Image (spheres, grey):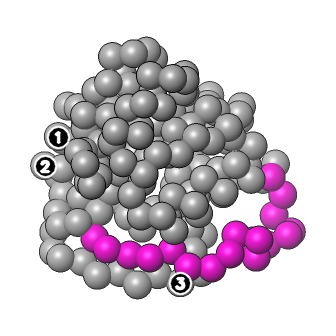
Amino acid sequence: MTLSNKRVPKFGGRGMKSDYRAFGDLEEMSEDRSRAEYNSGKSLRILVVEDHSDTLQALSRLLNHFGHDISTADDARSALDMINAKEFDVVLCDIALPDGNGYDVVVEAKRKGAVKAVAISGFAARDDIERGRKAGFDFHLAKPVDFHELRSVLGQIAA
C-alpha cells in the first residue's frame, strides 16, 4: 500500500531529490482492513515534517487513522517550534525543507530528549543515508514511502 492511489514520480538520478504527488482520498481505504491489522503496538506521539502539503496531509491522516497522536509542520522553523513546545516519541521528517533541512531538525529533537527519528526523503543514496545516520536519524525511508515499510518501522519503535 502506498500513500496514494496514484503517483507521478520524476527522478533526477541517483541521490537526487524526487518530486511526486499524493492523490486520492484516504477515506477510500479498504474497509476490510481494520486498525488492529495495521496497529504498530502502542500509540505514538509523532511529529510529521513535510513541505509537500498533499503528502503531509496523507501521512498525518493515515497515521492518525491508525491511532497515533499526530502533529505536523511544513518547514524547519515550524518543526523546531513544535519540538520546543511538545514531547514526541517519533519525528518523521523530510530532509529537504524550504527553510532548512531535516538534519538540523533531528539534531534539535535529539538534543531535547529521547526521540526516534525517521527520514522520509527522495535523497536515498548511500552517502545520504550515512549523513542522516550521523545527524541522528534512526531509520531512512525513500520516497515514495510504502505504508507497510513505515508501519514496520513504527512497530520497531513502539516495541
- Amino acid type at mark 1: Arg
Which quadrant does the N terminus fall into?
bottom right
First in sequence, mark 3 or 1: give its number: 3
Q: For the point 32% across and 34% down, which residue is it?
A: 105
Name above or below for residue 114 compared with residue 121: above
Q: Is residue 99 left or right of 41 when viewed as pictured?
A: left
Dot 1: few (<14), some (14–19), or many (≥20) neighbours within 10 Å? few
Q: Nearer the viewer, residue 102 or 145?
A: 102
Residue assigned mark 1 = 131
Which quadrant does the C terminus fall into?
top right
Residue assigned mark 2 = 127
Residue assigned mark 3 = 6
Q: Position of residue 115 (x, y in %)?
A: 46, 24
Q: Nearer the viewer, residue 87 or 15?
A: 87
Count of numbered labels shown in the rendering = 3
Q: Position of residue 93 (x, y in %)?
A: 39, 45
Alpha-carbon span between mark 3 and mark 1: 30 Å
- Confirm whether residue 75 shows in the render: yes
Q: Is residue 47 left or right of 99 when viewed as pictured?
A: right
Q: For the point 68% across and 75% down, which residue is it?
A: 25
Q: Position of residue 36 (x, y in %)?
A: 81, 48
Alpha-carbon span between mark 2 and mark 3: 29 Å
Dot 2: few (<14), some (14–19), or many (≥20) neighbours within 10 Å? few
Residue 31 occupies quadrant: bottom right
Residue 29 occupies quadrant: bottom right
Q: Is residue 97 left or right of 29 when viewed as pictured?
A: left
Q: For the point 33% across and 32% down, which residue is it?
A: 106
Look at the magenta stretch and give its main secondary structure. loop
